[in-house]
Amino acid sequence: MQRQDRRRFLQGMGASIALPMLESLSPSPAFGTRAEEPPLQRLVCIGTYLGFHQKHFFPEQVGADYQTSEVLEPAASFRREMTVFSGLDHRGRNGHHGWKAWLSGSAAGSISFDQLVAEHVGHQTRLDSLQVTCGNPPGEARMSFTKEGVALPMIGRPSVLYQTLFRSGADGARMEYLLASNRSVLDGVVSEARALERSVTSSDREKLGEYFSSVRDVEKRLRKQQLWLDRPVAKVEYPLPEFDPVSPNLALECESIMYDLMALAVTTDSTRVLTFLIPGWSQVFNIGGRNLSAGYHGLSHHGNDPVRIADYNLVGIEHVKRFTGFLEKLRAATDADGRPLLDTSAVVFGSGMGDANTHDNSNLPTVLAGGRFRHGWHRNYERDAPAPRLLGDLFITLMQGFGMEVDSFANARSGLSEHLA
């Protein structure tokens, strides 16, 4: 049977409806063939801004026979499909400012791991990557960075994320107009900058060179968006709430909806790279029918008070419950070969904050799920080992799983293939 481009087939049938990934509707040669696919096809990184209580997040035992920790208990059904890591970090800056290093290895904001993967696989989908959060996070809460070190904006409203993924025909016409307008403005700006280049100092010419590099990136994104305008957008049935639950006290409700929409983004192949920053403010959650003893941020600074630690863990457990629900959706959905999407997806869950009580960013809570790695272990890495391993080593191994030829990331040089392959 002759293979057909999945999106072109849908258009030819006069419909724009999301179908499962069928064998006969594999990607067209322009976007790569399945025979060339590396083991990993998707990356999802999920980080909680206020972290977890380390003692109750990490299992006490190391190895394959560990007992699931209190906070990770909701994910126990995925024990054989995930690995818990302790002892990993970037040896970087502490505090909330250092949180930004979680995916980049540098609090100063070098390119993040997810964006490196997006550069490699982003051409295959309408959206190179998506950055998601809930509401408007604190100023230091940033995850994804371009190669220029610029933090990428995040979508914090469920309705906006839904429209980004599943825009209407009217939205498409408006997008076509905006793209054409932006392209004409861009052409004019570049023309003026080229004329200016001949009359400035060498230092300014270097700055203009960086500017032109950024402009070329914008042009590439514009061209891609124009190419995808003629391809139908998936139609899904998802009942959005009457209003976006973006106020801090509704953060858990927003988190649940965002996970649902992220699962739809993956199952409709709208993007293959997602990051989700779960923010934290001073909101007082009501869990189990009672208000917790302090606001979320106050619980993270528990001062070793057992009551506050217990309540802090309750919030952490709620985060893990929602994470587990997302994994269940990826396990249930299948690709063209009948494989669960989770088998070809790497899902990183954790935090850029190690111990929120002391603002210590060492020993970062880290879980890897999916990807058919050698899972089922709690891997612990000693900080003072002769050849210590870093969080960047995990990222190296994951990038290699996408078929990327990399052997270093930030200050990491080893990878963790011997423990995961």
Image (cartoon, rainbow, N blue to C red):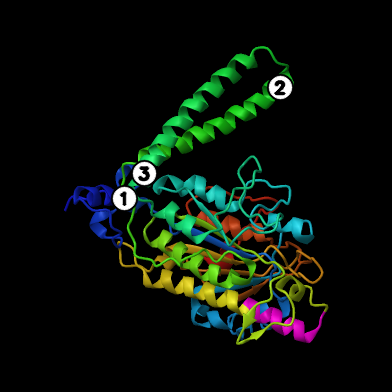
Q: Residues within 10 Å of mark 2 (few under 14, many from 20)?
A: few
Residue displayed at 52% across by 27% down: 186
Residue at the disc numbered 2: 204
Comes first in the chain, label 1 or label 2: 1
Quarter holding residue 308: bottom right
Cα–Cα span, label 1 and label 2: 44 Å
Residue 1: x and y in percent read 16, 53
Is residue 62 shown to the viewer in this render? no
Name the chief secondary structure element in magenta.
helix
Q: Is residue 185 magenta?
A: no
Please state the extent of the stretch shown in magenta in the rendering: 304-316
Tag count: 3
Counting residues from the N terminus, which is met first, the one under dot 3 or under dot 2? Answer: 3
**Circle 3 crowding by C-alpha within 10 Å: few under 14, some 14–19, many from 20:** some
388 versus 285 height, above or below: above
Using the image as rendered, state which of residue 167 and residue 47 is in the foreground.
Answer: 167
What element does badge 2 sit on?
helix
Q: Amino acid at mark 1?
A: Pro
Which one is nearer the viewer's eye here, 177 or 203? 177
Up/down of 155 relative to 110, above or below: below
Residue wearing tag 1:
27
